[in-house]
Amino acid sequence: MTEGSPGVSTGAVARRLGVSPTTVRSWEQRYGMGPAVREGNRHRRWMPDDVAMLEEMCRLTSSGIPPAEAARAAVALRRQLDGDAPAELSARPPQDAGGPADVPADLPADLPPPSAHGGAGGGLPLGRVRQECRGLARAALRLDGPAMESLLHEAMRTHGLVTAWEEVMAPTLHAAGRKWESADDRYVEVEHLLSWHVSTVLRRAAAAAPVPGRAAPVVMACLPGEQHTLPLEALAAGLAERALPARMFGAAVPAEALLAAVRRLGPPAVVLWSQSRATADSTLARQVALTAFGVKGARKAPLVLLAGPGWPPQAATAGMRRPGGLRQALDAIGALYAAQAAAPADDGERPGAPGGES
């Protein structure tokens, strides 16, 4: 769209914003955010300054700002761009309580309104969560990748990795999963795009951390058949934040490959993720816990952390623990490295270093 063009239709601008046309119309009804010019006083034609106003509305609501407040700021932006408030807009000031009650101004029209317990969360079943979580949910439903990435970076910068994961990322991911499971597989694209951006932010955080020293790394892997890697990616970012070394092997690692990696790396800890009972292989976990390495006469075995909701309570036997969450896993691993640093190395070997096979 260029200057001097006749503008675009409501449907076209809605597609550009990633919301439904009904949502755009509800913003006009509630907040007076209609186009400055209409074709024949009937058809809406959105000009560049109008589109900029709606883009600002989307950006602000994604950051968690309430829709009425975001609308006032967005309308002010268009007035600034226009150099003056259009007469039609001046005659119709924003109405915070106006518009149809069954069309929340910040939600696509084809989503049900939030429940009494859910609050305004962009149509996802969020419950009582941080404001940043609601902004992330709105951006996810609009498929607004740049907004999601910006919100995720800001959450990590403001709250740190653990709080950002436990109170912003994970609740929004769980809500997105529950949404499509209860909606006949609709909104799968919302969860996939959200997961991609969460993964991107976590991997960048891990890559940007200082390179650890010579200590043997933690091994992290999903069990055979397990595809859920995001919790382990959060753990990898948390270990990097603490300058602790790690090797992330990702989804569905075959049993023999996992055991070979443990023998080669000699890790002080191995984290095994299981999302469901179907992938929680207690026999393999015991094999990992019994995998010894190191120099003869001073061989060691790793501590196995059984992470994820798939593990039954009785799965943790000798040499294993079940951390209650990301913070507990990080603290347990950190304590292992602290203990190694306080103890003298055996025969000049670094703590946890793999030695010859016997």
Image (spheres, helix red, strand yellow):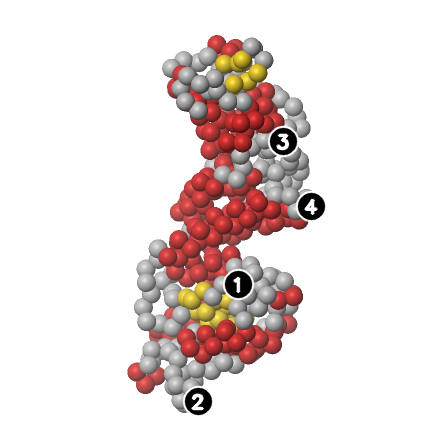
Looking at the rendered structure, the kind of residue marked 3 is: Ala
Regarding residue 30, the answer to whether it shows in the image is no
Q: Is residue 301 above or below residue 178?
A: below
Give how far apart the Cα atoms at labels 2 and 3 are.
Answer: 66 Å
Give how far apart the Cα atoms at labels 1 and 4 are.
Answer: 26 Å
Q: What secondary structure is marked by label 1?
A: loop
Q: Is residue 278 above or below residue 58?
A: below
Residue 296: percent from left, percent from top: 40, 89
Alpha-carbon neighbours of circle 4 within 10 Å: few (<14), some, or many (≥20)?
A: few
N-terminal of the pair, mark 2 or mark 3, is: 3
Q: Are marks 3 and 1 in contact (CB under 8 Å)?
A: no
Q: Which residue is mark 2?
A: 358
Q: Which residue is mark 4?
A: 184
- Mark carried by residue 109: 3
Taking the spot 56% from the left edge, 60% from the top edge, the residue there is 227
Give how far apart the Cα atoms at labels 3 and 4 are.
Answer: 18 Å
Looking at the rendered structure, the kind of residue marked 4 is: Asp
Regarding residue 20, the answer to whether it shows in the image is yes
Residue 139: percent from left, percent from top: 51, 39
- Mark carried by residue 251: 1
N-terminal of the pair, mark 4 or mark 2, is: 4
Alpha-carbon neighbours of circle 1 within 10 Å: few (<14), some, or many (≥20)?
A: some
The quadrant in which residue 27 appears is top right
For marks 3 and 4, give the one nearer the viewer. Answer: 4
